[in-house]
Amino acid sequence: MGAELRLDIGTLYAFLLVLARVTGALVYIPLPGIKSGPELARALIALSMTFALFPSWPAIDASHVTLGLLIGWMVAEAGIGVAVGLAVSFLTEGFQVGAQIISLQAGYGFAQTIDPTSGAESAVLIVIAQLTAGLLFFATGMDRMVLAAFAHSLATQPPGHFNISPAVINSMIRLGGMIFSTGLRLILPVLGMLLMVEVSIALLARLNAQLHLMILSFPVKMLLAMTLLAWLVAIFPRVFNQASGGVVEMIQRLLGS
């Protein structure tokens, strides 16, 4: 007796809605090299995450679903995913802002390399900061937190019942300020050291105008900045954890978890 495989149309609708939410989040979630990777790999990641959430898929009555309603739900679900991915990307952007400030002040802006994410040329410190933040995203368990929030949100915020309050929008806007606060917290000691170097060189140049100290200032600042950054790497996970607390709280409020 042959077995017959049947796919309920409501299950298909639930699959499409969860896939739209997950795919929207993957647009901004800092997976190293995901944007420069093949399209098939990105599709497989989205599908695997969607099937991992299968126990939490919503039960949808297909008899009351029209094409226009389904498209509206998918757009809303994609918007939810984009909002979650944007909140997570604030962490990596903070690291990149700090690296950009150091690159300009310490002279590393002249060193260019290929960004593995976008495939374009970028400052070497910015690429290092981006990869570091992406690795910390997995090392600190943020990926599991986001996946758990997605799973719980499918029960608390099923398709067709999602509503973003003005308080959540204001919290998301305030969370964007974390980009600058996190970046400054990471590189403030380096900025202080570079300021002292600039003041010292200015005083020496004032004492003897014949010295070409500007030529020597670049290697000195680069060496001191790299030495201090190597020492500050130990506190990067702590800063990332502290900043991720606000992001996780924002995601839980957004998804009603």
Image (spheres, helix red, strand yellow):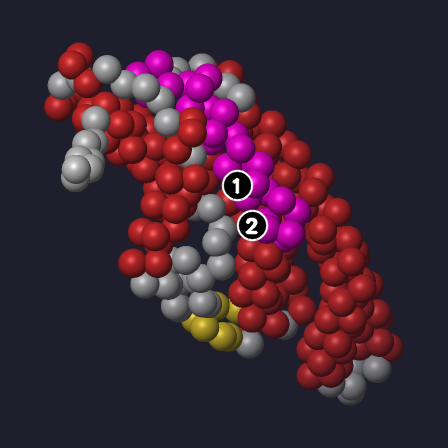
Q: Residue at x 66, y 39 (%)?
A: 243
Q: Is residue 13 left or right of residue 188?
A: left
Depicted 26 relative to depicted 122: above or below: above
Q: Amino acid at mark 2?
A: Thr
Depicted 37 relative to depicted 23: above or below: below
Where disc 2 sits, the SS reads helix
Residue closest to the eye, 27 or 181: 27
Residue ID for mark 1:
88
Q: Position of residue 177 (x, y in %)?
A: 58, 36
Q: Position of residue 225 (x, y in %)?
A: 74, 68
Which residue in the rendered view is the most extreme toward the left?
Answer: 67
| Count of numbered circles in the view | 2
Residue ID for mark 2:
92
Image-quadrant location for residue 85: top left
Between the C-alphas of marks 2 and 1, the distance is 8 Å
Q: Is residue 232 left or right of residue 257?
A: right
Q: Residue at x 55, y 25 (%)?
A: 252
Which residue in the rendered view is the most extreme toward the front?
Answer: 1
Asked if disc 2 and disc 1 are in contact, CB closer than 8 Å, the reply is yes
**Magenta part of the protein: which range?**
136-161
Residue 109 shows in the view: no
Q: Amino acid at mark 1?
A: Val
Depicted 154 relative to depicted 183: above or below: above
